[in-house]
Image (spheres, helix red, strand yellow):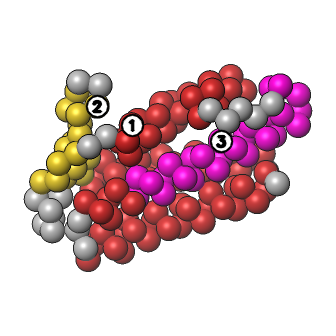
Amino acid sequence: MTHLLLQDADEEIKRAEHLLYISLKYTRTRDVMKNIIIRLIAADELAIAAILEDAESKKKIPDVPNNWQIKVQYVKKVKPNSKKHMDMYLLLKKLDDSSYTAREEFRKHITMAFNIDGKKLDVDVPLLTEYFKKTKEFIKYVEGELG
């Protein structure tokens, strides 16, 4: 089952990559950027599920919780190297749940402006690319750990 979850995570990464490098190149809209964030979250959630299933089978955790916040705590506990990425995952979740304004839509420097926890955060294509690369690295890390 863990192997299937990681395969699905790879598929989500491929979809995000296509959106980032193909769709966004030709259609610079906030909808494409939002979909990239959604795909990165989906890939992370599949990797988290794989980590937790593996940890449960090895009796490192009592069971796989339903609450995503508890899942993140468990992942940080069983895979301490993933703490930084779990923080980024939580940020992506906040971005997905937050309202935003789009600036320069349909132009080269499209930006989604968020207000997260009272702080302004501008998500542009370079930052989204960084999030993509970090998520892809995390999926590879999980595959290497559970492989």
Q: Position of residue 52 (x, y in %)?
A: 74, 37
Can the viewer see residue 145? no
Residue denoted by label 1? 94
Residue type at numbered disc 2: Ile
Residue denoted by label 3? 48
Q: Residues within 10 Å of mark 1 (few under 14, many from 20)?
A: some
> How far separated are the C-alphas under marks 2 and 3?
23 Å
Q: Nearer the viewer, mark 3 or mark 1?
A: 1
Residue shown at 71% from the left, 32% from the top? 65
Q: Nearer the viewer, mark 2 or mark 3?
A: 2
Which span of residues is magenta-colored? 36-62
- Residue 116 marker: 2
Residue type at numbered disc 1: Lys
Element under disc 2: strand
| Left or right: 35 as drawn, with respect to 65 | left
Residue 54 counted in the magenta span: yes
